Amino acid sequence: MVRIGIIGVGGIANGRHIPEIQKSSGGKITAICDINEKALKATGDKLGIPEHLRFTDYRDLIASDEVDAVEICTPNHLHVPMAVDAVKAGKPVNVEKPLSVNLDKAQPLKAALEENPVPNMMCFTYRFMPAVRYAKEIMKKGLLGDIISVNVEYLKSSAFIEGRRLEWRFIKEYAGTGVLGDLGVHLIDMAEFLIGDMKKVSAKTGIIVKERKKLDSEEIAPVETDDYCNFLAEFENGAAGVFTVTRCALGHGNTIKYDIYGTEGVISFNLNNPDILNVCIGDIDRECESMHTVSVPSKYRITQEQMFINMAEGKDCPYLPTVKDGLRSQKILDSLLKSSEENRWIEL
Ligand SMILES: NC(=O)c1ccc[n+]([C@@H]2O[C@H](COP(=O)([O-])OP(=O)(O)OC[C@H]3O[C@@H](n4cnc5c(N)ncnc54)[C@H](O)[C@@H]3O)[C@@H](O)[C@H]2O)c1
């Protein structure tokens, strides 16, 4: 049984990590950590964690001999220092995305893993969606031919939530990027996972809701991170990508659309329904100029947290996203911001 310690028990820990671990086999949450005493108590009580395994200093959780593996679910600027400590302690680690606030700040984790290569994973959650894993298999078989282009949209309206305050996501020091690191990084990881490495990017980012009230007072302060990013990408294999990432799309709670066009076929999915793919593959679809819908076979189902437990147990983990992928996508995030600032293509 892998005994798991979770650092940061806010939105994503309670929304995904904890429920998925509870439904997984082979793992158990034994310890939690948060600097927010209220959050620590609420999650600790919910899970029945004994007082001596509820920590306010993450170093104590990592050092605990009742923790075998560590999950890091804190704001972005804390991922790397916390993961470095877990790696130095020799404990398998799962790091939330994006890896860091910029590539420079991520280097200590790269160095720590070079010295002590413990099993490590990045929470590129959408790699675990059945539609994405099945798309990968179809593409590996070459059924789409050469990839010509990919059209991707990640649409949310969360910037317009009434009364939303200046939480850490809107402050550069803590978040690094805005919608890019929050949502765009998933699309970037998925694109390189499915299509291959990007070669260069050209982006336009912007802030729509320019100021917000601070979390703890009525004082108004500027939003410092991007609300939207539209970008073009050219892939090493010649494919072209068009990406729209925004938290300002009214009418969309969380819409992720992917269309991949090849010389022999097309795959299209919408992760609001991750169990189906729309495809145009084969002579009949081509002749009828139509797409048809397929249900993803159940063997393509695995959750992120089951994969983490499998990794910590030393099992085979196909398509595991690792810190190496986190470093790569961080480089692309930095390049997108640079491209927008300097109004030019950036070679990767
Ligand atoms: N994979 C995904 O799909 C996905 C979705 C949402 C969020 N995330 C990522 O998860 C991370 C957390 O996001 P969230 O929405 O849960 O944020 P959140 O603000 O809801 O939760 C963060 C928690 O970390 C705690 N924390 C802050 N500093 C700490 C410290 N020094 N030690 C211990 N705990 C500390 C906070 O008190 C809070 O409870 C972010 O990096 C975010 O990008 C990933």
Image: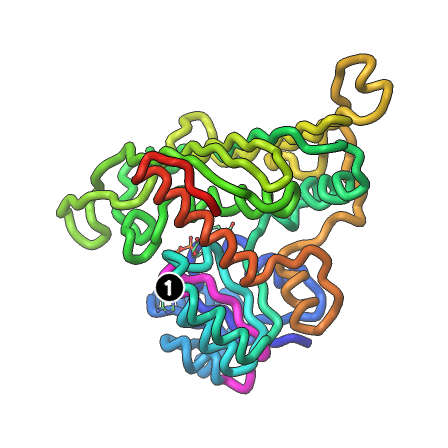
- Pinpoint residue 333: horizontal percent, then vertical percent: 43, 48
Front position in the image: 136 or 33 = 136
- Pinpoint residue 272: horizontal percent, then vertical percent: 60, 35
Q: Is residue 171 left or right of residue 105?
A: left
Q: Is residue 306 left or right of residue 330?
A: right
Q: Is residue 73 left or right of residue 143?
A: left
Residue ranking furthest to the top = 288
Q: Secondary structure at mark 1?
A: helix
Q: Where does the magenta region start and end?
A: 64-79
Front position in the image: 344 or 303 = 344
- Pinpoint residue 50: horizontal percent, then vertical percent: 49, 79
Q: Does residue 27 lie above or below 140 as drawn?
A: below
Q: Is residue 94 magenta?
A: no
* Quadrant position of ligand 1: bottom left
Residue at screen point 79% across, 38% down: 142
Residue at screen point 31% across, 57% down: 174
Residue at screen point 86% across, 18% down: 284
Q: Does residue 156 lie above or below 304 as drawn?
A: above
Residue ranking furthest to the bottom = 65
Q: Which residue is mark 1?
A: 105
- Pinpoint residue 120: horizontal percent, then vertical percent: 58, 68
Q: Is residue 67 magenta?
A: yes
Residue at screen point 23% across, 37% down: 210
